[in-house]
Amino acid sequence: MMTLFNDLRPLIAPHYVTNIILATLYFILKSTPHVCHWVFNSCTLEMREWEWLTFLACVIVLKNRKQANLVEYVSTACLFTKALSLVCFLNYSPAYAVLYALICIAHVMFLPKPVYQGPESIIYFRGPNLCDEIARDKRITWLIAFYVAWSPKCIDLAPVFSEISNEYNLDNLKFGKIDVSRYPNIAEKYQINTGALSRQLPTIVLFQEGKETERRPIPTKRVTLKFDFTKANIIKEFKLNELYGQCKKNLPAKKKPVDKTETKKEK
């Protein structure tokens, strides 16, 4: 029950509430007495609109079958539903379609997706500073997120990576991020494709003793294997619980955390 509440709580934000209303606006107007006659001169959906709705439901189910959480599921569903609503408005009147599109644009501009504002322990790097810092002290283990500001997947990763950094940060286990769209030489050095259709954004790389030991997603000669950047997946694939315990043992006695590990639950 608590897990469900935690999943639903972000949807109370104005962005998501208005997003859901906008996505279903056409169908709300079509089914509201008096309003539907005034706006459309009809209060029933046409047969082809029912067909479009059925097709939309299939697309949403297929597209969302691997979504990381409820918020992402709702966001994706709203995106496709707004596309269908635009088509429906256009089918009735181009003027309605233009007005609806302008409202959707205004929604994105004035009620953007909420940004994570919780605690984090992340170092933001600039250019060659990343390589210098990794090589400076090889006793430090680094988990680095390579991202670009315009990528929706990178935006979705931000709160997850921040939470993990806050939970697992130690003096010898640190977390960092770098915007590879601003430093293409870094993207080239670590073989990360920053193109608009790239499947390597974001990329998380683990560095131990100054060398890369693990990365997700995994690139191959032909394609980059898809990876879902959920909190559980990141902890599992990078073995963060074991890594945290190992790094904690290697800390000097005076720097060992008193109760951080004792309260950590097995994941």
Image (cartoon, helix red, strand yellow):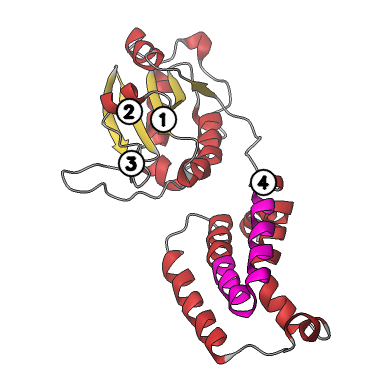
The secondary element bearing badge 4 is classed as helix
- Distance from disc 3 to disc 1, alpha carbons, whole Å, reads 13 Å
Looking at the image, residue 106 sits to the left or right of residue 73; the answer is: right
- Distance from disc 2 to disc 4, alpha carbons, whole Å, reads 30 Å
Which three-letter amino acid code belongs to the residue tagged 4? Met
Residue at 46% x, 24% y: name it.
Answer: 176
- Distance from disc 4 to disc 1, alpha carbons, whole Å, reads 23 Å
The secondary element bearing badge 2 is classed as helix
Residue 226 % position (x, y): 32, 51
* First-in-chain label (4 vs 1): 4
Which three-letter amino acid code belongs to the residue tagged 3? Gln
* First-in-chain label (3 vs 1): 1
* First-in-chain label (2 vs 1): 1
Looking at the image, residue 224 sits to the left or right of residue 67; the answer is: left
Residue to which mark 2 is pinned: 187
**Residue projecting furthest to the right:** 34
Q: Quadrant of residue 103?
A: bottom right
* First-in-chain label (2 vs 3): 2
Residue to which mark 3 is pinned: 200
Numbered mark located on residue 109 in the image: 4
Give the quarter of the figure containing the N terminus: bottom right
The secondary element bearing badge 3 is classed as loop
The secondary element bearing badge 1 is classed as loop
Looking at the image, residue 241 sits to the left or right of residue 221; the answer is: right
- Distance from disc 2 to disc 1, alpha carbons, whole Å, reads 8 Å
Query: Foreground residue, 115 or 252?
Result: 115
